[in-house]
Amino acid sequence: MVEPGYDLAEMVHSAMAIAGLQLQDRDVVVFAQKVVSKSEGRRIELTDVVPSPRALEIAAEVRKDPRLVELVLRESKRIVRKIPDVLIVEHRLGLVMANAGIDQSNVADPASGEQALLLPVDPDGSAERLRADFRRISGRDVGVVINDSFGRPWRQGTVGVAIGCAGLPALVDLRGTPDLFGRTLKVTVIAYADEIAAAASLLMGQATEGRPVVIVRGLEATQAPAPATSIVRDAREDLFQ
């Protein structure tokens, strides 16, 4: 139950010590986006939100709380698609996602009021700060991934993706390397941070698990670190704008 100002790295370090575990160099610490957002004070009281005329109009069309729609508009560059019960936007970070990543599940006890949680202001920056905190606390050089659940076009269901990372390559470019038969790979670029996030999601869960941190060990990526923003496809390459 993370609150604003909590030291996430210290919490993880202490919990690992209780469990008889220690971080190792090259470990990757995967955080659920929610605990990062909570620690950074990104929780919003809906009673404090006044919907704009545009939010009221869109809310009626998509059948959503006008206050949530107002928050979505504030966090977004543009609306990509909207139909009843669905509002897909381009987030200010460039992420195309439902509801600008704003969520009410596992945010707070409903008895404490209606609250919603926004994404971190700068997820890559958050990951870099957490990585520095782990280095200070443990002396270990680790990677950090901030994991969020995304829906995908043409596929049912959600999957974990990296909205922030530090200390590892977000993408692993295999172009120019050979396959099993010596053929040169021409287009293969692996969404490395996304694959880590998806794997961690299997352990994190989505409902009552209460397991917002996963340690991934044994990865061997050798390419230079790059932030999660590098995963976002350039608009000039997006055939589905």
Image (cartoon, rainbow, N blue to C red):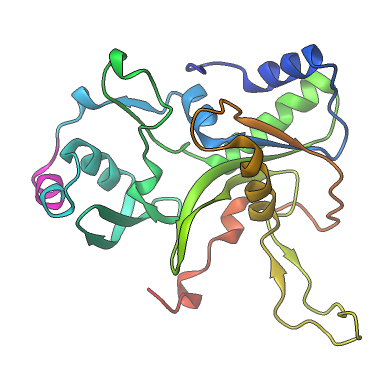
Q: Is residue 111 above or below residue 171?
A: above
Residue 217 screen position, x and y as percent? 83, 40
Is residue 62 highlighted in magenta?
no
Residue at the location (86% across, 87% down)?
183
**Residue sitting at 36 percent across and 47 percent down?**
100
Answer above or below: position of 139 versus 228.
above
Give the camera-side residue of 233 and 12: 12
Asked whether, in this view, residue 82 is left or right of residue 176, the answer is left
Q: Position of residue 26 (x, y in %)?
A: 85, 40
Q: Nearer the viewer, residue 102 or 151?
A: 151
The C terminus, quarter of image: bottom left
Taking the spot 53% from the left edge, 67% from the top edge, the residue there is 233
Q: Main secondary structure of the magenta part?
A: helix
Q: Nearer the viewer, residue 71 or 125?
A: 71
Q: Place residue 189 in its image quadrant.
A: bottom right
- Residue 49 at what x, y percent from top left? 20, 30
- State which region is magenta: 51-58
In which quarter of the view is residue 129 placed?
Answer: top right
Q: Is residue 52 magenta?
A: yes
Image spot of residue 240 (x, y percent): 40, 76
Horizontally, residue 207 falls left or right of residue 110, namely: right
